[in-house]
Image: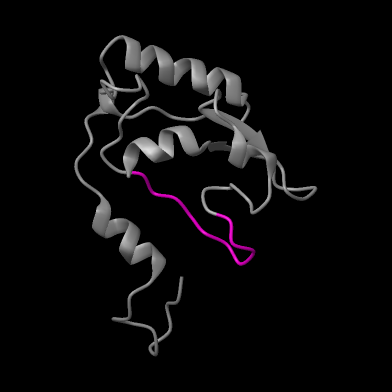
Amino acid sequence: MCLTAKCIGKPTAITFIYSLLVPILPGDAYAINNALSADDYETCLKLLAHTGVVDKSSLSGFPKFDRMLIGTGPVGHVASLFPRHPLLKENQEWVASVSPKPRPERITFTLIPCDQFF
């Protein structure tokens, strides 16, 4: 984040992120422990959708999110879905583990939940 006099008042990623913040009740936030696997996180999402905590699409049964903050990168990836990566063809899993280079290891939504958002 730029904190010099030249940058004050200019939009930055962090100011954009803060502009999206809305009050969140403690019961509405779910932490993702980076030690959890993609399978565990997907199981949690399915449970939240099944119990009605998270709304789901009446057509697909996949969760519907109010907001989805995803990043993009210089090689053309969106939400850690990289060009020509096999995950782009995934049609069963909601969450997957991906490590495009030796580090960092990540979990990401597949296109399935992302498609429900748009």
Residue at x-position 70% and y-position 47%? 104
Q: Position of residue 116 (x, y in %)?
A: 35, 35
User: Looking at this view, is 107 or 62 the one in front?
Assistant: 62
Residue at x-position 40% and y-position 66%? 13
Quadrant into which the C terminus falls: top left
Q: Which quadrant of the view contains residue 27?
A: top left
Residue 105 appears left or right of 90: right
Vertical comparison of 73 with 7: above or below: above
User: Looking at this view, is 52 or 113 the one in front?
Assistant: 113
Is 13 magenta? The answer is no
Residue 50 appears left or right of 100: left
Q: Which quadrant of the view contains residue 31?
A: top left
Read off the magenta span. Answer: 68-77
Is 73 magenta? The answer is yes
Vertical comparison of 19 with 59: above or below: below
Q: Position of residue 8 (x, y in %)?
A: 33, 82
Residue at x-position 42% and y-position 77%? 3
Magenta stretch, overall SS: loop
Vertical comparison of 108 with 16: above or below: above
**Total numbered badges shown on the rendered structure:** 0
